[in-house]
Amino acid sequence: YAQLMLALQQQMPALGENEKVVFMGHGASHHAFAAYACLDHMMTAQRFPARVGAVESYPEVEVLIESLGQEGVTA
């Protein structure tokens, strides 16, 4: 995951203080969906300016919207 975050960091746009990028994966009922939550957790823990969600598994977009609002993210 650390290598993925490094690769993503090199592709990130310039962001304002209250902005983050949201990456959305498809998700699945397969146990591998845990990778989305793991990557999202690492991004949050390392104050990476992005979050990860999944359309058909966790973390759902509603969870991200609530969490980003609590973080003061506006865009």
Image (tube, grey):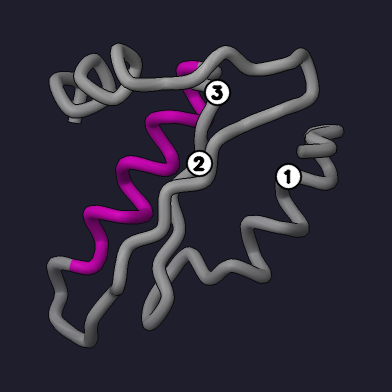
Which x, y percent locates residue 70?
A: 84, 43
Relative depth, front residue between 20 and 36: 20
Q: Which residue is mark 1?
A: 68
Q: How many residues crowd mark 1 within 10 Å: few (<14), some (14–19), many (20+)? A: some
In the depicted structure, whether residue 71 falls above or below residue 27? above
Relative to 40, is 72 above or below? above
Say few, some or many: other residues with alpha carbon within 10 Å of mark 2 (under 14 / 14 to 19 / 20 or more).
many
According to the image, label 3 marks what residue? 49
Query: Marks 1 and 2: CB-CB under 8 Å?
Result: yes
CA distance for labels 1 and 2 = 9 Å
Question: Is 31 placed left or right of 45 in the picture?
Answer: left
Q: How many marks?
A: 3
Inspect the image, locate mark 2, and give the three-letter code of the amino acid beneath it: Arg
Left or right? Give the position of 32 relative to 12.
left
Query: For residue 51, which numbered disc appears in the image?
Result: 2
Q: Nearer the viewer, residue 13 or 47?
A: 13
Q: Position of residue 32 (x, y in %)?
A: 13, 67
Q: CA distance from mark 3 to mark 2?
A: 7 Å
Numbered disc 3: secondary structure: loop
Which stretch appears magenta?
Answer: 33-46
Magenta segment, prevailing SS (helix, strand or loop): helix
Q: Name the quadrant of the C terminus.
A: top right
Q: Earlier in the sequence, mark 3 or mark 1?
A: 3
Is 32 on the left-hand or right-hand side of 23? left
Disc marking residue 17: none
In the image, is residue 58 above or below residue 14? Answer: below
